[in-house]
């Protein structure tokens, strides 16, 4: 029936998104130096930017 069809499409889409996530984050993360990430996290915790 129609509802089952929508559920299956949604499930397939979800799996597709999950499969693409690691590839995308691997493209981004290595370009950021760990110290820059740490600095950004500290800045967020303090509520002010540290450059």
Image (tube, grey):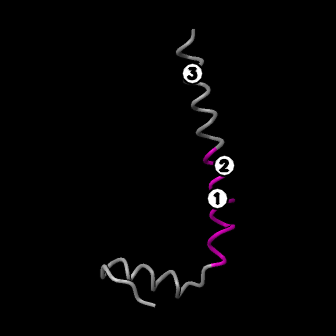
Mark 2: give few (<14), some (14-19) or many (20+) Cα within 10 Å: few
Question: On the rendered structure, is 1 left or right of 40?
Answer: right
Q: For the residue labelled by badge 2, is the local secondary structure a helix, a strand or a loop?
A: helix
Residue at image position (55%, 84%) is 34
Q: Which residue is drawn at 31% across and 79% down?
A: 47
Camera-nearest label, 1 or 3: 3
Mark carried by residue 22:
1
Query: Magenta includes 25?
Result: yes
Q: How far apart are marks 1 and 2 (CA)?
A: 7 Å
List the single residue furthest toward the top.
1
Categorize mark 1 by other alpha carbons within 10 Å: few (<14), some (14-19), many (20+): few
Question: Is the C-beta separation of discs 1 and 2 under 8 Å?
Answer: yes
Q: Residue furthest bottom?
A: 51
Q: Position of residue 42 (x, y in %)?
A: 38, 83
Cβ–Cβ under 8 Å for marks 1 and 3: no
- Measure the alpha-carbon separation of dots 2 and 3: 20 Å
Q: Give the range drawn in magenta.
A: 17-31
Point out residue 5 in the picture as x, y percentages from the top left corner: 60, 18
Residue at image mark 3: 6
Q: Number of marks in the image?
A: 3
At horizontal 58% and vertical 39% (from top left) the residue drawn is: 14
Mark nearer the N terminus (2 vs 3): 3
SS at circle 1? helix
Q: Is residue 8 above or below residue 37?
A: above
Quarter containing the N terminus:
top right
What is the distance, in whole Å, between disc 1 and disc 3 at their CAs? 26 Å
Report the mark closest to the observer, 2 or 3: 3
Point 52% across, 15% down: residue: 3
Q: Is residue 45 above or below residue 20?
A: below
| SS assignment at label 3 | helix
- In the displayed structure, would residue 13 be above or below residue 30? above
Q: Mark 2 points at which residue?
A: 19
């Amino acid at each position: 029936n129609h509802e089952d069809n929508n559920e299956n499409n949604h499930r397939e889409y979800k799996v597709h998104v999950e499969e693409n996530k690691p590839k995308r984050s691997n493209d981004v993360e290595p370009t950021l130096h760990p110290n820059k990430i740490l600095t950004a996290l500290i800045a967020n915790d303090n509520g002010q930017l540290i450059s």
